[in-house]
Amino acid sequence: MTSKKLTHFILAAMILGIIAGYLVYQFGAESGLANQYVSYVSVLTDIFLRLIKMIIAPLVFTTLVVGIARMGDASTIGRVGLKTFSWFIAMSSVSLILGLLMVNLLDPGVGVNLPIPELDASTGLSKGGFNLAQFIQHIFPTSIVEAMAKNEILQIVVFALFFGVAAGGMGPRAEELIRNLDMLSHIMLRITAAVMKFAPVAVFAAVSTVIAENGVGILMTYGKFMLSFYCSILLLWLVIILISALVLKGRTFQLVSMLRQPVLLAFSTASSEAAYPMTLEQVERFGCKNKIASFVLPVGYSFNLDGSMMYCSFAAIFIAQVYSIQMEFTQQLMMLLVLMITSKGIAGVPRASLVVIAATLAQFNLPEAGVLLILGVDHFLDMARSATNVLGNGLATAVISKWEGELDPHQTNP
């Protein structure tokens, strides 16, 4: 199946999913058919995401080890790492600040005037245990087998860094092992191509079950909030693309075009993880060398979540607006600093953005129960966040590759 055909099938699956979900909600809500539909059809999405997760750990490990072993000495690795994290911090700052500016400009929560609930009202989200010290400790694996079993990407990256540097230091003796790992990474990409044929079915299931469970009416209830956030996300896309264009020049829009399929997949499944293998393949086709792409992308999945960062600042201020709580400008700036730190400690956690928001609200005496207001539409917002995360990481990979002089000027046809 060609890239263009798969894109068309995914778009068609989204449309059919909306129609099917609406019909099930309309005619099956009272009889209980909607609940049965959700419980059975959602299995298709779970299967697809499980297949993707099956691929990620061996793919990240093999590509990163091969890339590090062929990158050269430790100074080169350190230089690439410094450039990568500098870009990530800059883009995270842009995302948080833009989210703060847009929510204050659009005021999606102003006028709701809900009564303030008790500060200790439960949200049902586990936000304890995520602080900077524990996050740093969590980065280092006690067992690579356990890290792979749980798809702990950061832990896999740390082990792969040690393994790659050690293998590279052994010279010709390790060359056969490196070639075998390179072959394994290409096998995993071949498996990815096969799994992607199931993507339209998973997209149909994901979209239809959400509509069948919540109905279309929920989109109207939160219309202003969702519309404001999507407008902000589109502006963030424009800013990220323009900043990337300062480095990539005219080729930026070529890369954006090549990333449309993984971006669409992330959007329709609300999972940036689902798009990881396809994103890696597309940036390499664009001309990024494997040794750079295999380092930047997996690290970016924990440290460069542009869409999630914007959502954290946007949603936190929205909740304050809903309860008519005035926050001084200095308080909002302090919130940005807190979000910059806390958002790095919960990568890979289900509903990660909501966990960050809930933890941050408590520190600024805002009602944590406000998270429940956005819980119903979080899936639809997660679709935009996931797509943005994929776009941001794809562009970041190309930028770092260009800075390192490792970007092929002639792209492969997508």
Image (cartoon, grey):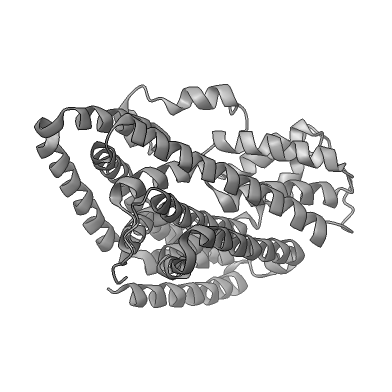
Pick the residue in front: 167 or 275: 167
Pick the residue in front: 284 or 280: 284
Q: Residue at x 57, y 51 (%)?
A: 306
Quarter that holds the C terminus:
bottom left
The percent coordinates of residue 259 (x first, y second) are 42, 65
The percent coordinates of residue 11 (x first, y second) are 46, 75
The percent coordinates of residue 24 (x first, y second) are 55, 71
From where the camera sits, is residue 21 visible? yes
Q: Is residue 73 above or below residue 190?
A: above
Q: Quadrant of residue 126?
A: top right
Q: Residue at x 46, y 67 (%)?
A: 256
Q: Is residue 356 above or below residue 257?
A: above
Q: In the image, 320: left or right of 178?
A: right
Q: In the image, 116: left or right of 229?
A: right
Pick the residue in front: 71 or 109: 71
Q: Is residue 10 above or below residue 70?
A: below
How many numbered marks appear? 0
Q: Residue at x 16, y 49 (%)?
A: 183
Q: Residue at x 41, y 36 (%)?
A: 79
Q: In the image, 253: left or right of 410?
A: right
Quarter that holds the N terminus:
bottom left
From where the camera sits, is residue 32 visible? no
The percent coordinates of residue 390 (x first, y second) are 47, 56
